[in-house]
Every structure is written in structure tokens, then in C-alpha cells.
Image: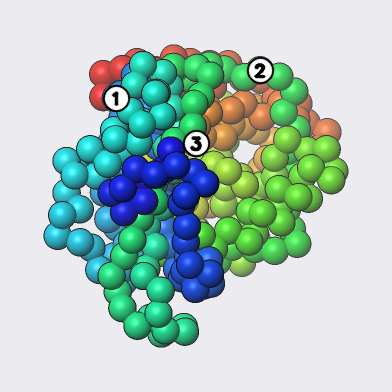
Amino acid sequence: MINQDGKIIRDENAKLSVLNRGFAYGDSVFETIRVISGKIMFWEDHYFRLMASMRIMRMEIPSNFSPEFLEEEIKAIIEANGLENSPARIRFAVYRQHGGYYTPATREVGYVVTAEPMEDSFYVLNDDAYEIELFKDHYVNSGLLSTIKSNNRAVNVLGSIYARENSYANCLILNEKKSVVEALNGNIFLVKGKVIKTPPISDGAINGIIRKQLLNILKKTEDYTLEEASISPFELQKADELFLTNVAQGIQPISKYRKKEFKNDVAKVLLSKLNVHARLG
């Protein structure tokens, strides 16, 4: 079942025009949201990021798009799919209504909400082999557009194909300054001694929800020094630990980059703190 503009319909009955601007021009933004037994994880952060993304894309935010209204829309699709007592992954996509070419005929929007089941209620550490490489065929540009989740994900798609063709679990993306920005599906953190480093949003990194949660957690601990600073590719092999973050997986340790193999001790500790944070949030 799918929630399309507030109507719950069967998957096979859901239709978008071939002139839909999300399809035609990538004129769409989205949020990937984790729901556990009907509770939306980090909902306030998701809501404000969605509103910020719509403003950056100069979309008209409907007057009824309150946190309460959108929360009810998400819960409606959860119930329609029988996932009230299960972990679920939600995709909330907002697109500008069709009309016009590059210049939109309207700034009004429509939306689609989908739900699918997930295996685990809370984040579980995946300590399987997880080798990565740099994806250097294309770069992301630093700036606001790179920080939002839009339908313009060509670099991520091509990088994912490259990773699969070369038997890598993931790849890291560079910006036009050749700094490491993020992974194909999440933010990157580097651990060296007692310093934990992640690229700043100004480098073009996605303004990740789990990234934000970890920054808040790290700011309250005296065990590590947090740095939001550009990461050079040369730093990767000198690190003690590398890990990725996103809403679906939480924290994913990296086991190998080129000839360097990494530990996952810090990732384990932070994952435990993240699960506690999620339960209390």
C-alpha cells in the first residue's frame, strides 16, 4: 500500500504522470525514515531537514505540512501495511507538480509515502568484511544542493555500479577540491587516536540525521575530540578506524581500504550510545 497525496492506494494503482517533475527533472526531495513499533525515530530532525530541503528547492510548502500532519501521514501508511508492531523503513518523497520545462509552471507540491519492513528494531553492528574504495569518475560539488536528499543522485548510482563491478561494499565520494565528502549511502567518520573527524556540511556532505545524532553524542563525551574538517584521501590509510552512518544501518564499520585494515572498537561504543539515544529520543 502507498500513501499518495493523502490517499491510501494499492501499489498497482499508484500512478505518476510521465511529466512528473521528479522524473523529468529530478525536481523532488525525500527523507528515508526509520519507524519502530509505530514510533518515528528522530522525527523532529527529519521534519526540519525536509522543510529546509523544500525551501532550498524553492518549493511551496503547503499550509497543512505541520509536523503533526506529516506524522499522521506516515502512521497511516504504516498501519495500511500492517507494520504497527514492526520495524519499518519509510520513504517520504515530495515533488513539484508537473508543468513547465526547466522553469516550473507552479511551485505547488505533491507527495508519496512508501513503507517496507526491516529486520531489526534497533541498530546492530555488522562486523562482516566491508571493503571500500574511492570513486573518482565523478565528483559532487560543495554547496547547499549537495547537502539535501534530492532525486539528483547520478553520482551515487554510478558509484554503486562501480562498487558492484569491482566487488567493493561501498565507495567514498570526492568533491571538486578532491576532499573526501561521504560514502555512496551515508556520512563518513575517521578515527585517529582520540580524535574523531567528519567532513563539514560546507564540503558538500549530506546533512545526515545519524551524523547529527553522533555529533551531539560526541560533544557530550570527554573520551574523544570531535573535528568537523575536510578529509584528504591521504588520511584514510593513516586512520585507526573508519565508519559510515545512515538512518537505515546506524553505524557501519569499514574493515579495509586498499592495503589498510581497520578495527571497529569505537564504532561498537558509539553504536551502543546511539541505540540508547534512539530509545530516549
Q: Which mark is residue 127?
A: 2
Q: Amino acid at mark 2?
A: Asp
Element on which disc 3 rests: strand
Please identify the quarter of the rendering in which residue 79 is found: top left
Q: Which SS class for mark 2?
A: loop
Residue at horizontal 84%, vertical 45%?
165
State whether residue 188 is above or below residue 206: above
- Quarter of the image for the N terminus: give it: top left
Residue displayed at 46% across by 83% down: 102
Measure the C-alpha gap from mark 1 to mark 2: 27 Å
Q: Is residue 81 left or right of residue 242?
A: left
Task: Give the mark, 3 or 1, whose residue is nearer the N terminus.
Answer: 1
Q: Quadrant of residue 133?
A: top right
Asked whether residue 196 appears in the rendered view, the answer is: no
Reply above or below: 36 against 232. above
Q: Which residue is mark 3?
A: 246
Rendering coords of residue 101 (x, y %): 47, 84
Query: Percent x, y for residue 134?
Result: 73, 49
Q: Earlier in the sequence, mark 2 or mark 3?
A: 2
Asked whether 47 or 11 is in front, the reply is 11
Residue 39's mark? 1
Q: How is the image coloured?
A: rainbow
Quarter of the picture holding the C terminus: top left
Amino acid type at circle 1 is Lys
Query: Is 107 positioned to the left or the right of 183 in the image?
Result: left
Marks 3 & 1, CB-CB < 8 Å contact: no
Position of 15 with respect to 190 (left or right) is left
The CA distance from mark 2 to mark 3 is 16 Å
